[in-house]
Amino acid sequence: ETYNNFLLLRGSKAMSRFASPEHQALSRLLTLSAAYDHQAGHAVCEAFDLLSNEERGSLTRWLNSDGITPGQSSYVLCDAPRFLANAKVNRNVGLPNALRMLLRVQQQCGAELMQSIHTRVIINLGSLAQWAKDAGQKRGDFLQAQLTVRSEATGDTKILTIEVSRPASSRSLIQTDFAHSDAKGSCGWCGQLRALLLLSLICNALALCLNFSGSASAFLLPGDGRSARGPAAVALSLLSLVLGLLLAWRCLQEARRYREGTVSLHETGPRQPFLSLEAWSLHPRSLSRNARHQYSRLLMEEDDTV
């Protein structure tokens, strides 16, 4: 093994071209997966070797398409590093299944591009990257998800966004999680508001009793209640005022939290190269549903997105 590592290191310094098309495709996969050491690179190489000959051939032709050869397009895979990283970490997915999912993306994009030819194709894998993170167990098998493509043309550039339709079990589980989270949060702050309101009313009632009822003062205050009823009533009134202010502040905080609450990915739309104009603002709930799905192009600045 040491000898082979030496040959790889020594040969890479003098090699002026790729040894084979598969070598070129594997090099791009290593770049997309942000592999910078032998351990990370070994995982990608093993996943590539686990594909069948037909799968490796199809993936190789797609990754090596450069847009220079007539009839070919160059492909920019946005969010591919996040997609591969999530698949690698998730034991229910793994890199081999991630590469097979890329082949399905290739098929979907190929069907979309049959209608027109563009020299540059940008493919957004944001939803697929999130699915690679969530898939498994009760959420359904990773490869069971259905893929659809939404396209947009800008000059000689075609922008394709991959949308994921998750298995039914995954969708129902997500809805249950959202409902449980909302119910839990609602019960928590409602209980606090009720407690503050009850304490404020009790303090007000005691202050009124001390002010207007001598028998109540004698019952509530030890000894000569009449001499202490005035200061006690003032103290209770101040406490009631503080509790009322605290109650108002808590209501304002809860209203602000509701307005500024985060919106899930399926409500705000996909990530780059599409992004909702206001989706990540501080007040997403104030937007209409149509406004959340107005998209603008973003420049890609990730070095690993190739």
Image (cartoon, rainbow, N blue to C red):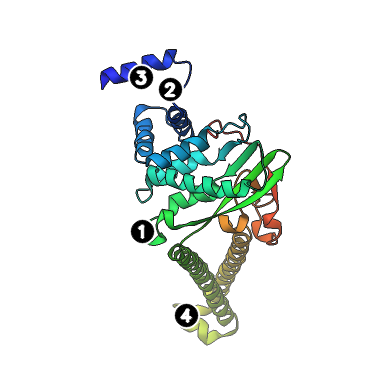
Across and down, in percent, residue 59 comes to: 47, 39
Q: Earlier in the sequence, mark 4 or mark 1?
A: 1
Quarter of the image with the N terminus in it: top left
Q: Residue at x 60, y 84 (%)?
A: 212
Q: Secondary structure at mark 4?
A: helix
Q: Which mark is residue 8?
A: 3
Q: Earlier in the sequence, mark 2 or mark 1?
A: 2
Q: Name the kind of residue labelled 4 in the image.
A: Leu
Q: Residue at x 54, y 76 (%)?
A: 229
Residue pointed to by mark 2: 19
Q: Residue at x 48, y 64 (%)?
A: 171
On screen, 140 above or below 42?
A: below
Q: Secondary structure at mark 2?
A: loop
Q: Please state the total of marks drawn on the protein image.
A: 4
Residue pointed to by mark 1: 137
Left or right of 251 in this view: 132: left
